[in-house]
Amino acid sequence: MYFFYYYPVGVDVPRPRFPVGSWSLAALLVTTYLVAQLWGESLGIQWQRYVYRPAEGSYLTPLTACFLHGGWLHLGGNLLYLLVFAPALEMAVGGAGVWLIFCGTGYLANLIQGVLTVHLAPVNAWAGVVGASGAVSGILGCFIVRYYFARLKIAYWAFLPLQGINRTGAVHLPAFFGILLWVGLQIVYALVQGNGGGTAYGAHLGGLLVGILLAFSTGQLQRGRLDRLRFQARRERDAGNLHGAVALLDHYLQARRWDESAWLELARALSAARLWGRAQAVYAEIARKRADEGDLAGLTEVYLEARRGNQSFCLRPHQMRSIAFWLEKNTRIAEAVSVYLDLTRMYPDHETREHAMVRAASLTLTRLHDRSTGLALVEEALDDFPDGAWRSLLERERERWQMSTA
């Protein structure tokens, strides 16, 4: 007995958000299977009505059959492929897009299987077709066009007893070749099975073809070529070629100037390459955009990240004060103190400086419970503050804090 099995276990497409569409689709497949297996008879649902039979000519069952499975191995195999490729594709087309691709390509894949069955094996035209294999193949077809440059991790098992080979492992290879390997195996299995088998390889290959055509017709290849620049930039960055990563991101952003996450990647690459001046300019532009949108949380994170890379980075005084307030409100006290102190040092003549110093000292003493540092900040402020309300307040508070220390 000879066989070779391989299964995809991951792709190197980043997922900055949770793929709700893909996981909800998988949950529906599992729920449908469990309901059919555990409570199908008691619920009185005639599941056979939703099975696709090519001889019937039904317009609905090619779709409903996509959500039914003949066994847990059948379901598990489809879920594996779905949850490797669909979440990555969802980053490009959205959750609704994944659902539309799944349903549309699955429907057409089953019709293709039906046409092949009627013409090549009419004796099987009344046999039922179920499973999400055609729909998942459609997702693979879209994926191979949009992410032709991605890398795929596969786990394999090769068993060739006459050659003394019984090997398992995992390897990385270009996703394009990984899916071509899958296509080759489908063709081989279909030829070995012939017309009387129980697996709908016509739906597998038909779904893949429909997915490829759909991706080309909706411009996914052109978008994928741009995505390739960003992916290659990440690979260059990981390999330590920071200047190469910067050049690729610059090229990418010439076409997609609105992609803020790519601007952040560019700022990080510039900082890592110690191109401080340009990194500061990019961070400042991202901060300006978030401020214009009223995104204070986002503005705060950009400021803190930029400061970690370049201690000379600053924003306008009122923006820094708003950031410090926001950090206080969200109980990030040490960071709030740091921003208040940044404000006092970056803008020594600004009207908000005295308030910022008082807040930094107060938070250090009362929230961080660091009395030595807090009192040192108080003395620094008193040495610098002119006579006035802030100085009088600070003198009174100093006496109170010193007494509580004693």
Image: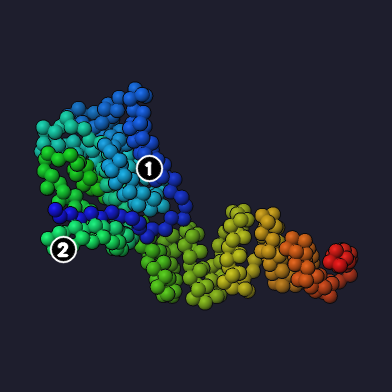
Kindly indicate the quadrant of the structure image that contains residue 152: bottom left
Q: Which is nearer the eye, 323 or 220?
A: 323
Q: How many labels does the image show?
A: 2
Kindly indicate the quadrant of the structure image that contains residue 53: top left
Q: Which is nearer the eye, 210 or 8?
A: 8
**SS of the residue under disc 2:** loop
Q: Which is nearer the eye, 9 or 157?
A: 157
Q: Where is residue 172 in the image (x, y as percent from the top left)?
A: 30, 63
Instruction: Point out the frontmost of discs 2 and 1.
Output: 2
Which residue sits at x=37%, y=45%? 98
Q: As displayed, is residue 280 above or below residue 48?
A: below
Q: Mark 2 points at which residue?
A: 164
Q: Is residue 182 visible?
A: yes
Q: As displayed, is residue 237 above or below residue 22?
A: below
Q: Position of residue 296 (x, y in %)?
A: 63, 56
Q: Name the N-terminal-most of marks 2 and 1.
A: 1
- Which image quarter is the C terminus in? bottom right
Q: Can residue 59 be seen in this view?
A: no
Q: As displayed, is residue 72 above or below residue 81?
A: above
Q: What is the C-alpha distance between the residues marked 2 and 1?
A: 39 Å
- Tag 2: amino acid: Gly
Which residue sits at x=69%, y=69%? 342
The residue sitting at the bottom extreme is 274
Q: Within 10 angstroms of label 2, few (less than 14), some, or many (20 or more) residues? A: few
Q: Mark 1 points at which residue?
A: 26
Left/right of residue 68 with respect to residue 113 in the rendered view? right
- Tag 1: amino acid: Ala
**SS of the residue under disc 1:** helix
